[in-house]
């Protein structure tokens, strides 16, 4: 389905994590890991949040919300790189071009687009599949059984136009020469230029911080949250305690009307007394990145709006995702270490050892190899929260004395694709005490796991 190609990172299900690459030997005797896999098998077959129709709706809704946000807050286009900023208005377009340094296309011809997330492979069979996907009409309905816009909308669903472009080896290398360098094994690529892109996380959070401050929001950063407890059962107020020895937080212990837990995989130990079975439905998957700096290769400005997903590297969970940074250096990341325990799920995270670094980066694509031995290279580690419902948001509201506690986690590999949708659903609960959106209601759950 187009929704999975549209966001290439979504191609891998929970079970692909087992089948394709990382070693599960260390987890073979882990009861929590076994329970997670059993729950995933059950939910992917029976949970309404895991159906293909619901997934398509969630992706579409999230894209729509992204467009709304960059229209309302053009500053976001300094970090959220895609055609959406070109179409959102003059202010958004200016931020993309002036702040992010990424030019909007000057032609409606997809072949002349400067934007998009490219899916690349050296596999001839996959190239044939990609060529076919670009040549045939794409079913843009939320429900695949309706193959035309008319039948889709008549059934009460939404249709979204999607058009792929296929590029052979020569065309791919010409468009991505600043990334691929000597990677001659790339045989083709597929891209949707209009509704795919990427986020520059190194600048996004400073932009968000400025927006919050300008709206009067008090931010406590680098906080180590120790506990969430009921402060007053009658009103549902909650008491949040933070580690006062951590510098820079300044929140101490405070009472709140409502609390959203968005602590990724660390949500599990934090909510252990509230949702004890959550541990069997949410695990952490750690990945690693390299970011170039002084002395590292740079991407030409006219290629800086293009992101790469190296499909063959994904199958090995090596360095598979590549994009430009705000100063046009290369950032590349990959890896796949599963954490099915509560140990090590809180940041900061350790970088991988030398052997794993060699496998992911030194033996990976040329753009990764070029960064490994440079002293200016920044090494980064992050952890994705992967839920048993697949690479989708895990949005929950608890009940009883915990009725004002909300969980916003999950996403798996689709964080920057789906955060816009999940945060909107969470905000509805916070502001109106209800969900007024049908897709949000279908994506959410009340109460603890069983």
Image (cartoon, helix red, strand yellow):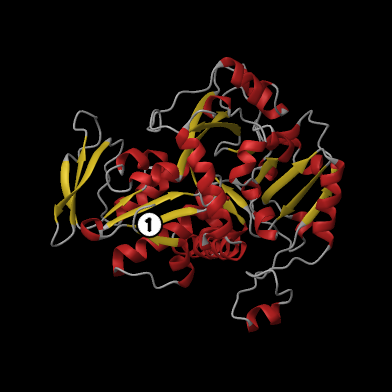
Residue 229 position (above or below residue 435): above
Residue 218 in the image: state x and y as whole percent.
Answer: 25, 49
* Residue 279, image x, y percentages: 40, 41
Count of marks placed on residues: 1
Task: From this view, report whether residue 202 is shown above or below residue 71.
Answer: above
| x then y, percent, for residue 379 | 52, 25
Report which quarter residue 325 is drawn in: top right
175 shown above or below 152? above
* Residue at 66%, 36% in the rendered image: 320
Q: Is residue 244 left or right of residue 196?
A: left
Query: In the rendered view, does 280 fall on the left or right side of 404?
Result: right
Residue at 36%, 41% in the rendered image: 268
Q: Residue at x 82, y 64 (%)?
A: 136
Residue 59 visible? The answer is: yes
Within 10 angstroms of label 1, few (less than 14), some, or many (20 or more) residues?
A: many
Q: Is residue 284 left or right of residue 299?
A: left
Query: What residue is rendered at 25% in x and 33% in y?
Result: 248
| Residue hosting label 1 | 396
Element carrying mark 1: strand
Q: Nearer the viewer, residue 63 or 347?
A: 347
- Residue 288 shown left or right of residue 445 in the figure: right
Q: Quadrant of the N terminus?
A: bottom right
């Amino acid at each position: 389905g187009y929704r999975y190609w549209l966001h290439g990172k979504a191609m891998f299900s929970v079970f692909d994590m087992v089948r394709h690459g990382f070693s599960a030997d260390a987890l073979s005797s882990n009861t929590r890991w076994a329970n997670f896999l059993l729950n995933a098998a059950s939910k992917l077959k029976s949970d309404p949040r895991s159906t293909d129709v619901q997934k398509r709706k969630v992706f579409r809704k999230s894209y729509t919300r992204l467009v709304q946000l960059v229209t309302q807050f053009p500053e976001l286009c300094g970090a959220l790189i895609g055609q959406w900023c070109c179409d959102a208005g003059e202010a958004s377009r200016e931020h993309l071009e002036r702040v992010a340094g990424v030019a909007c296309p000057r032609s409606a011809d997809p072949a002349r687009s400067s934007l998009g997330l490219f899916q690349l492979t050296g596999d001839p069979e996959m190239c044939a599949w990609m060529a076919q996907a670009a040549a045939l009409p794409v079913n843009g309905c939320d429900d695949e059984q309706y193959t035309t816009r008319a039948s889709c909308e008549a059934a009460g669903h939404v249709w979204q136009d999607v058009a792929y472009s296929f590029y052979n080896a020569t065309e791919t290398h010409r468009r991505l020469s600043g990334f691929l360098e000597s990677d001659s094994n790339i045989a083709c690529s597929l891209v949707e230029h209009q509704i795919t892109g990427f986020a520059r996380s190194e600048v996004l959070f400073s932009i968000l911080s400025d927006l919050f401050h300008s709206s009067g929001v008090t931010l406590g950063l680098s906080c180590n949250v120790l506990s969430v407890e009921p402060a007053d059962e009658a009103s549902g107020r909650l008491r949040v305690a933070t580690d006062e020895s951590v510098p820079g937080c300044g929140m101490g212990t405070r009472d709140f009307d409502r609390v959203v837990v968005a602590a990724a995989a660390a949500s599990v130990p934090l909510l252990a007394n509230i949702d004890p079975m959550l541990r069997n439905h949410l695990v952490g998957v750690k990945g690693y990145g390299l970011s170039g700096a002084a002395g590292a290769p740079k991407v030409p400005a006219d290629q800086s709006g293009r992101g790469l997903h190296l499909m063959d590297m994904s199958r090995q969970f090596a360095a598979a995702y590549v994009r430009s940074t705000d100063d046009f250096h290369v950032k590349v990341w990959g890896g796949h270490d599963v954490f099915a325990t509560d140990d090590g799920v809180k940041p900061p995270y350790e970088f991988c050892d030398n052997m794993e670094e060699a496998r992911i980066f030194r033996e990976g694509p040329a753009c990764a190899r070029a960064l490994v031995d440079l002293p200016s290279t920044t090494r980064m580690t992050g952890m994705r929260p992967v839920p048993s419902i697949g690479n989708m948001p895990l949005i929950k509201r608890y009940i009883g004395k915990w009725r004002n506690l909300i969980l916003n986690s999950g996403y798996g590999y689709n964080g920057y694709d789906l955060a816009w949708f999940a945060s909107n659903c969470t905000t509805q609960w916070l502001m109106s005490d209800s969900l007024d959106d049908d897709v949000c209601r279908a994506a959410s759950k009340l109460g603890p796991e069983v």
